[in-house]
Structure formats: structure tokens, C-alpha cells
């Protein structure tokens, strides 16, 4: 894209001690002693929320959803993620209010056209799906294949945005669930929601007030997912 820096990957190449100079600090020789750490705030509340966070099933996400200010705050946090080269390789489409119904009805019409033998009781399924949560945010991945930054890095940034959105919703007292069903996977369906040809849906983040406490699911044992590299 024309408005992106030509050498957006200037930080690539040999790693610099101290993490490089892009944040203002001059490079430190590798053999110099590290500076003393500075005091930074910690948050026991944030840790407790992260340690207990779990998805709420869609049926348990009820009104009220976030108001405009709360949703804006969540989206600002969602946009605050690592983003190699500052490409902003993601964007958000908000489905709320009556727009959910209109979007769902268009999806139902397309789904019926793709599946002409669809049972009668499934012909409003996508409308019903979108009407369940008060607010759904479609996280759109839009990597720039022409950029020097690997596409994987860009796609991972979209996943980080989705997860930040869920964490922010949790911290504001809402429940959330990340789903990626046919409307996000089918390019014609996604196009109905405004997703472009060079874009892909990373997820539908459904947000609402919790109407139940979801049971937790088993989490992987640390020993199964963590190793320490040794020569
Ligand atoms: C990209 C992505 C897509 C997902 N799509 C679905 C889906 O279509 N259906 C589903 O039942 N779960 C799906 N999930 C899983 C749900 O988000 C699930 O509720 C979650 O893994 C539960 O874990 P948690 O309690 O840690 O959030 C998806 C997860 C991810 C990361």
C-alpha cells in the first residue's frame, strides 16, 4: 500500500542488544551490564481475570451488550497489539442492533441459494445466530502480501487483536466467545458483511452480559506444552 513505509521491516536483520533503538534508547553494547529495571505497575486484578477467563457459550450471552463507550474502549484495546511494521493488518466490523437481523437475513438467503435442499427449520439459522449476542465484532485479517513483513506475522497480529478484544470485554464485565462458522469462512458470505477479496475473517467475537457461569474446560498441563531449550 502506498501510504506504508517502503522499508517497514527496518528492524529485521541482526538483533541489537537492548531490543534495538526504535523506542528511543540507544543501542547498548552486548557486553555492557544491563541497566537497573525501573518500577512498573502490576495488577493482581488483571491477573485474576486472565487466570479465570473462559468463553461463554453464545446462548449465555444476553442483553445488555456494551454501550457505545464500552465498545469503543474494547476496540481501542483490541487495536493495541503487536503489529510488525505498523501495517495495521486487521480491522473490525461491528454487528449490533437491528443491523444484526438484516445481516442475518442476507446470510440466510445466500445459504439457501447454496443449499437449495435446506430443511425449513434451518432457513432462519444465521439470522437467529446473529441475534443471539447483543454485539458481534467481526475481526478481519487484511495482510498486505506486498509488504516486507511476512504474512504470518500480519495474520498473527489479527489473532492478537481478537484476543485483546475478548480480554477487554472480560475486564469490563462482559462475556465473549470467538467463533468462526460459515459466515466467516465462506467468501461470498463474508462479502455480504463487507469483507473484501483480499481479506479474511479471523473470527466473530460475540459479546454480551453473562447469564450463567460457564464451567471451565480442561487446560493443558504445563509439562505438555512447555519445554526449555538446552544445547
Ligand atoms: C479461530 C477460532 C475459531 C473458533 N471457532 C469455533 C467454532 O466455530 N465453533 C466452536 O464451537 N468453537 C470455536 N472456537 C472455540 C471457541 O472459541 C471456544 O469457546 C473456546 O475455545 C473455549 O475456550 P476458552 O474458554 O479458553 O475461551 C474457535 C476458536 C478460535 C480460536
Image (cartoon, rainbow, N blue to C red):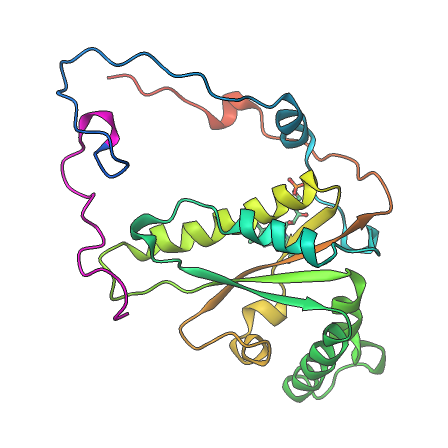
Position above or below: 169 against 135: above
Circle count = 0
Quadrant of the rendered image containing residue 132: bottom right
Residue plotted at (68% across, 62% down): 136
Tell me: 50 left or right of 12.
Answer: right
| Residue 41 rendering spot, x and y as whole percentages | 52, 22
Residue at screen point 63% across, 43% down: 168
In the image, is residue 127 above or below residue 172? below
**Left or right of residue 96: residue 43:** left
> Is 141 placed left or right of 67 in the picture?
left
User: Residue 214 at what x, y percent from top left?
Assistant: 80, 40
**Residue 157: where, in percent of width, then height?**
42, 50
Residue nearest the observer in this picture, 53 or 115: 53
Please tell me in which quadrant of the rendered image residue 133 appears: bottom right
In the picture provided, is 209 more to the left or to the right than 54? right
Q: Is residue 101 above or below residue 226?
A: below
Question: In percent of the image, x 44 and y 70: which residue is there?
Answer: 199
Picture quarter with the C terminus: top left
Residue 5 colored magenta? yes
Q: Residue 103 in magenta?
A: no
Q: Residue at x 77, y 70 (%)?
A: 97
Q: Position of residue 198 (x, y in %)?
A: 40, 73
In the image, residue 229 sits, relative to residue 186, either above or below, namely: above
- Give the main secondary structure, helix, strand or loop, of the magenta stretch: loop
Q: Quadrant of the N terminus?
A: bottom left
Which residues are drawn in magenta? 1-19
In front: 166, or 117? 166
Task: Decide which of 222, 73 is in the foreground and name it.
Answer: 73
Amino acid at each position: 500500500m502506498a501510504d506504508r513505509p517502503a522499508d517497514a521491516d527496518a528492524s529485521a536483520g541482526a538483533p541489537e542488544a537492548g531490543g534495538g533503538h526504535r523506542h528511543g534508547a540507544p543501542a547498548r553494547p552486548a557486553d555492557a551490564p544491563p541497566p537497573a529495571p525501573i518500577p512498573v505497575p502490576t495488577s493482581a486484578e488483571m491477573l485474576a481475570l486472565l487466570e479465570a477467563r473462559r468463553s461463554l457459550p453464545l446462548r449465555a450471552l444476553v442483553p445488555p451488550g456494551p454501550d457505545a463507550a464500552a465498545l469503543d474502549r474494547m476496540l481501542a484495546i483490541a487495536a493495541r497489539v503487536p503489529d510488525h511494521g505498523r501495517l495495521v493488518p486487521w480491522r473490525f466490523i461491528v454487528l449490533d442492533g437491528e443491523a444484526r437481523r438484516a445481516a442475518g437475513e442476507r446470510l440466510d438467503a445466500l445459504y439457501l441459494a447454496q443449499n437449495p435442499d435446506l430443511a425449513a427449520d434451518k432457513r432462519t439459522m444465521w439470522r437467529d445466530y446473529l441475534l443471539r449476542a447483543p454485539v458481534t465484532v467481526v475481526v478481519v485479517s487484511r495482510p498486505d502480501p506486498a509488504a516486507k513483513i511476512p504474512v504470518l506475522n500480519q495474520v498473527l497480529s489479527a489473532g492478537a487483536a481478537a484476543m485483546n478484544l475478548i480480554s477487554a470485554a472480560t475486564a469490563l464485565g462482559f462475556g465473549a466467545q470467538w467463533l468462526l462458522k460459515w459466515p466467516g469462512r465462506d467468501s461470498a458470505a463474508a462479502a455480504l458483511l463487507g469483507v473484501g477479496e483480499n481479506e479474511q475473517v479471523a473470527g466473530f467475537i460475540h459479546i454480551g452480559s453473562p447469564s450463567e457461569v460457564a464451567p471451565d474446560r480442561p487446560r493443558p498441563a504445563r509439562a505438555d506444552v512447555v519445554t526449555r531449550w538446552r544445547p
